[in-house]
Structures are given as structure tokens and as C-alpha cells.
Image (cartoon, grey):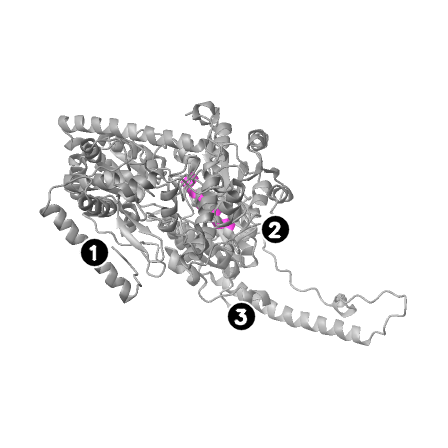
Amino acid sequence: MARSKGSTQRSIERREFLQKGALAGAALVGSATGAAAQSPAPAAGQPAAPTTPVMTAAAEAAEPREVQVLDENQRCGSDYMVDVFKSLGFEYVCANPGSSFRGLHESIINYGGNKSPELITCCHEESSVAMAHAYYKAEGKPIAVMAHGTVGLQHASMALYNAWCDRVPVYMVIGNYNDAAVRRPAEWYHGVQDAAAMVRDFTKWDDTPWSLTHFAESAVRAYKLAVTPPMAPTVLVLDGIMMEDAIARDNRLPIPRLTIPAPPQGDSGSVEDVARLLVAAESPLLVADRLARTPNGMKLLIELAETLQAGVIDQGSRMNFPSRHQLNQTQRAAAAVGEADVILGLEVSDFWATVNTLRDQLHRSTHRIAKPTAKLITITTGDLYVRANYQDFRRLQDLDLAIAADGEATLPSLIEAVKRLTTGDRKRVFQERGAKLAEASRAAAERSRVAATYAWDASPVSTARLSAEVWAQIRNEDWSLVSNYYTDATGGWPRKLWNFDKPYQWLGHAGGGGIGYGAPASVGGALANRRHGRLSVAIQTDGDFMYAPGVLWTAAHHRIPLLSVMNNNRAYHMELMHVQRMCNARNRGVDRGTIGSELTDPNIDYAKLAQSLGVYAEGPITNPADLGPALKRAIAVVKRGEPALVDVVTQVR
Amino acid sequence: MRIGFRGTAAVRVVIMAVTLMAGVVAQAGQAARAPQPGTDQGVVSGRLSYTQTGCDTCHGTDGSGTAAAPRIATSALQLQAFIAYVRKPTGTMPARSAEAISDRNLTDIYAYLHSPAVRSAQTAAPPAGSVAAGAMLYKKIGCYECHANEGQGGAQGPRLGPNPIPFARFGTYVRNPAGDMPPYTAKVLSDQDLATIYAFLEARPRPPAVNSIPLLAP
């Protein structure tokens, strides 16, 4: 359905009004300027005449112009847009305010009552998107993000790329005045022909609707495509005039019904083949990365692993498997890969790097760590949808079997096939295998505990001590680690020391490795956790925090309870190591290797920064003995429903 | 496998020669002689097999051990027990089947690990070094970035101290690391500097017993 005739007429009237208004304004300014030019200079000691335009007698005497407000029988396009957004179930919309979507902004807070969606005020569009990214992973539902079509989307683009690489739906709504004839001066800077073009390489779909009916269909389609695996951000470009134009109140525009497609399962024959290989294997290994889309994903992986008594590596892009499960071999991942005769990758984003290593020296070399005879299998939606330009699809690994399907959706049929094919003899073999894996897992955990004792009392505080101190304070709470500090090459201290056994206790990584995700993602995850009464905890790295620290103000303003514990090592340490690698490779010495990577001179006072944003904060803490009491005090604040920050000066990583 | 190789023609010739030599030695080892642990021939073959099999990745280039795996040089383990362990290890070490490495090759590796050269590397005393100067140097040249401020190890590098690996092995590894560690030549880090850092690592305090720390209770 096209825009109504009445609406079109009003639009033209509006343009006429704006044109005439602009001319009148120009005359007014010209008149005021002329008056000022004729005025005598003020006498000494007299105040100067105001330089801003003042209403002239002629303007005061002018006939009142037509009043342009909605009448009782009208509403506006963006009111209808809010109706559609409400039908999609959005709880929140994150935005840094922008004039190109001012109509929608007003409809959300007035027409929509600022409820479902509620507007969350953000200080940077990158924060808006990263909040939405983490919110989805905590709640399993997308929230919307609004931004300018040009300057806002450019700010948001890095965070959108993270979400793309992480295969997370972000519902992006951007404003643009498509019609050049009605743009205010600033709207030329903010106007663009093809607004979504700049992010099209790393979004799944976008559209620029030309009517409200077109909008409604595209709004529902954008949601549907975003949440259908392989999931990814989508972009809706909304015309400013379409938002602002009046429509008849009784114009009952339809709201399309949302039907989310079931994710694709592996075909039964291929699933049977995988089951046969797993049951016959002497040392099968399950590797999960972006597997658990829903809380059921973890349950299914536990069931498959326990049925087979197979080892599991959780690569950590989702909360796939309990950290202390006896079959969890993540802390000895390289050894587990080397032992395996069948390796099943479940939504693994980088299967090549799972079974190979790359030696990062002057001349890079690679080495396969899996047995040459090991059967390699993947089940992933990654085979269903890739784009050409950005290279997040990784190296191509030779495989024995690949199923292009959703991992979680395929697990029930795979479990059923494995159970059906398992004989009594195999069950006995499985049990023996499980006992050995349990012992290996226990030994690895013990090694981690012992490793944590080294530098226990050192200052700066060791990252092991920091993790242990936080764990001591939260272990009896219903907690959730909402920052992206969890895994690294060997597992990361929280995963080594904490008992992760619930799906919401870990929200995964940034996806694209873009720094600046951690702080806003923590706030977004905490926003999702708030309704469930969970204690949200972030181990916040300093370099990441400094990208957009204003997100802590958002947490304070919206009363989002969150404990942020600074892992303040006063440098971009990953990058520092890269520079050192170059210094060594070029045999020039590393004395100057810290230049450009350290955050010192002056040291940043994160407690003061947080306090200035309205957040309770303590620190900097350098004595590990002071950490426990400070965390206790901060958690008391968080339990009152507010954010709190504890700045800890730590060792490197 | 090697990617992005940009070596000179001369380097490529040397590599080809080494590869050919390795092939000759391997063939000779498999076809012409019975394994004789402790002989020069067994030691040479064993040294090649040791690196080709990847033992050095975890146990270090001369079996001195790293944070990832224990010392196996000059161990008291008998040859047959050594081979049996490689076939069915406990802990994190991956098993090596007879198809992956023969008993004969393992015997040669055993010979290498008990050779006089390896034995002397285990017992060489480090030169004297100042702990305080070592602490400054450890920070200055960036050891802390991967191995953490107290040498306790981190996500990117294993634990170095206290009780570091033998000094000779330490020096060899710093000059010619087996893994991802960037190499330090004598131009940027003298042997005396190495000794100074080693003194710092030796002086690191021993940690409290894990069971004495309530926060680390499982």
C-alpha cells in the first residue's frame, strides 16, 4: 500500500511551508542585520547591543501563520512504526539521540509510553550496538538500536562488525531524510543515497522502505532474517519524512505476523554417518564454539558427551559446556586434539586452527596437531552463508564430512542415532574412556589451582588472584560474567577457577576482536540480567574501557546493576607483545617496545572516572589483601540496584 | 608445512641439504643398523627424531623440560619403560603409536637424552647475576609481557620461576625458542644479561601450598 493521498498532500504543504518559512526567516535575518548596521555605536560605558536577532515590529505585526500540529483525527507514521516494533516484542531500544529519527524517538517516548520498547540513552552508537549484542546472548531476544544513517552508523559500524563475526542478531534502525528537497542544512551532512551501503558487507540484509506498508513488511522481515541461523545484524533505513508525516488515525495499516523459521537440521543420512563414526571411535572429541543458541544447547551437548563418554572442548564463543564437568577437556585442549581419532566441530568458527597451529615467527609456519588419520567432521551454519570481502570465514580445512546445518538443532537427532547404534560392548568401552577423561580433567584443574598460587601476594595483583577474589565473593550468588574476559589460549583464569554450569553465566566474545566491546557489552548483558535478579560481574580491561567509558553513565542513569572489576594493567598488552615480536624479529632490542602501547604518564584513575559518571567506585587497589573487602562493599551497592566499579592495578594478563 | 617463506637461495640450499641428510640418517637408522643406545650414531639420529616428532615442543630442545612438560633428559626411567610411557602416557601428553614413531626411533631418542652433551647441559652452573638488576632487566626486555611480572607464567607464556630450568637450557631456549616466543640474540641480550635474569627467576619466592589458600578451594 502506498502512502495515502491525504498524506501526500500534507507532505507537499509542509514543503511549501518550509520553503516559505525559510524565505521569511531570511528576510527576518536580513532585516535584523540591516537594523544593526544602522544603529549607532554604543557610548562608552553603555552595554553593547545584543548580536542575536530580535523580533522586529514588522514580525510582531505579521498575520499568524497556519498552525501545523496533528489534529485529533491524525497520528504520524512513526506512531505506526512503534505499533510494529511493539508487535515484535522489543523490550528496549538503545540510542544516542539523532535528528534524523526524531519522529520515531518522540513516538517511542510519548505514543508508546516509553515501554516495550523503553529508550536506553547511550553516549556512543558503538555502545548502543555492543549493548544489544550482549543483551541478545544473555536473553535470547534482540533489542533495537537507533542511529543516524550517516554519522551514527559510522560510529556503530565497528560494533556491527563484531556482531556479524559473532553471528548475533542486532536490529539496526537508522534515520535518513531521503528527499533532498526537504532537508534542513544539517540534514545534508546526515543525508545519504544508500545509507546501509557502508555496512552491507557485514550485515545480513537491509532495506529502505518507501511506504508505511513497505516499512511494516521490511521491519518484520528484518527481524525474521536476523534471528534465523546463521544469525546476523540487519538494517532498516527509515525516511525522516515518513516518520513525521501525518496519517489518518482511523487508517488501520496492517501489522504483519512474525513467524520465525525453524533452524535447518542436518539430513538424516549424514547424521547417521556422524553417529556411526562417533560410536566406533576410540577417542572421539566434541568441539563446540557458537553451538548453544539457547539454554537447551548446553543440555544437549552434555547429553551427547555423556552418552559417548567423549571429551569436550568448549572454545567459548557461547556457554556450551560446564567448566567443571568431568568430560571437559578445555584446559588440555591441544593434548585432547592430539589424542582424538574423530573430531566433531559444532558451530566452530575456526576449525582449521582447532586441528593446526601457526607459529608466529619471522617466517610463519604451520603444523597439524591432530593425528593425520583423525576423521574430521563439522556441523555448522557457517557453510550456509558467507560474504566475500571481510575474511572472517577463516582457512579451509580438509574434512571427511561436513553438514551445513544448525548445530543445536541437529543434536537431538544425532543423540538419538548415537544411542541407537551403541551396543553393550561399546558402552563398556565408553565407561572406561570416561574414567580416564575424568582423571585427566581433574589433573588439569589441579594444575590450574597450583599455578594460581604463584605470585599470590604480589603487587601489582596477579590476574589469578583477582579472579579468585572475585569468585570468593560471588560463588554463592546467582551470578553472570558479562564481560568478554574468560578465555584465551589456555582457558583464562575465571574458567580455570570458577564453576560455570548455567547457560547465562558466560556470554561469549566480541566476535570480530574489535576492542571497545567489553564495557558496553557488560552493561547490555547486565540489562538483560536485571529482570532475572542475577548478579552481573565484569572483569573489565582498561584499554577496552577507554574506548567509550560513557556507557557507565548509561548504567548509572538506567539503574543497571553491574559490578565492574578493573583488570588495569596500564597498557594495550596484546599489542605490546606484537610490537615486541617485531623488535625481536628485527634484532633491534625491545627497550622502546612499550612506546605507543602503554597507558601511563599519567596513570588513569578509573575510580574517579567512574565516580564522575555517577557510579560508586573504589581504587586503585595495588595490595591484593585490600581487594576482598573492596569487592564486598561494591557488591552491596550492586545489590541495591546500581553499578559499582573497583579499580585493581594488575599484572599483565 | 611452511607458508610465506622468504629465505634466500643460500638458505634454501642449506635447508635442502639438512633435509636430505635427515632422510639419509633416517634411512640408515631404519635399515642398516641395530639400535645402540649411547652410540654417536644413535645420538645423532635420536636428536633428529626428537625434534621431528615434536618432543621438543613441550620438553624443550634438549629434554630439560618446560612449564608444559617435565624434564626427560637423563631421567632414571629405563628404556623399555620410556617406550611404554610414550605409547600409553598418563596426563596431558598425547600417545604416540608405533606407526607414528617406531621403537627404534624411540631408542635413538633415549640415547640422545642420555648423551654426554645433554648430561652436561643439565649440570652446568649459571654465572653469577644480581637479583635486583635481573628484576629491572626482566621488565625492560619484556619477559613479563608473556611470563607475568613474577615469572609465574600467563596465558601467553609458561612459568619460569622459581626453580627455573637449567641455565644452559634456559640460554639455548632464549636464543632459539621452539614455539612462538620471539628469539633474543646476543646482540640485544648478552650472556651476562641472561645470567642476571636467571638470578631473578631463581630468587622468586616459592608459593604457599595450594591447600593453605581458602580462596583456591575447589
Q: Is residue A260 visible?
A: yes
Q: Which residue is mark 2?
A: A601
**Magenta segment, principal secondary structure?**
helix
Left or right relative to A60: residue A582: left
Residue that label 1 marks: B19
The chain that hosts pointer 3 is A
Answer above or below: position of A52 versus A117: below
Give the mark toward the camera: 2 or 1. Answer: 1
Query: Which quadrant: the C terminus of chain B?
Result: top left
How far, Cα to Cα, is label 2 from label 3? 52 Å
Q: Position of residue A526 (x, y in %)?
A: 50, 38
Query: Are there few (<14), some (14-19), or many (20+) residues within 10 Å of tag 2?
Result: few
Identified by mark 1, the residue type is Thr
**Residue A550 vertical placement versus B77 (above, below):** below
Q: Badge 2 sits on which subunit? A: A
Coordinates of residue B19 in the picture (x, y in percent): 20, 56
Secondary structure state at the residue bearing disc 1: helix
Q: Which mark is residue A181?
A: 3
Does A132 lie within the magenta span? yes
Residues at discs 2 and 1 both on one chain:
no
Q: Residue furthest left?
A: B31
Going by the image, does A91 lie left or right of A411? right
Asked whether A280 falls inside the magenta stretch, the response is: no
- Taking the image as shown, residue B186 lies to the left or right of residue A249, namely left
Pick whichever of labels 2 and 3 is earlier in the sequence: 3
Given this view, does label 3 or label 1 mark the residue nearer the observer?
A: 1
Q: Which residues are magenta?
A: A127-141
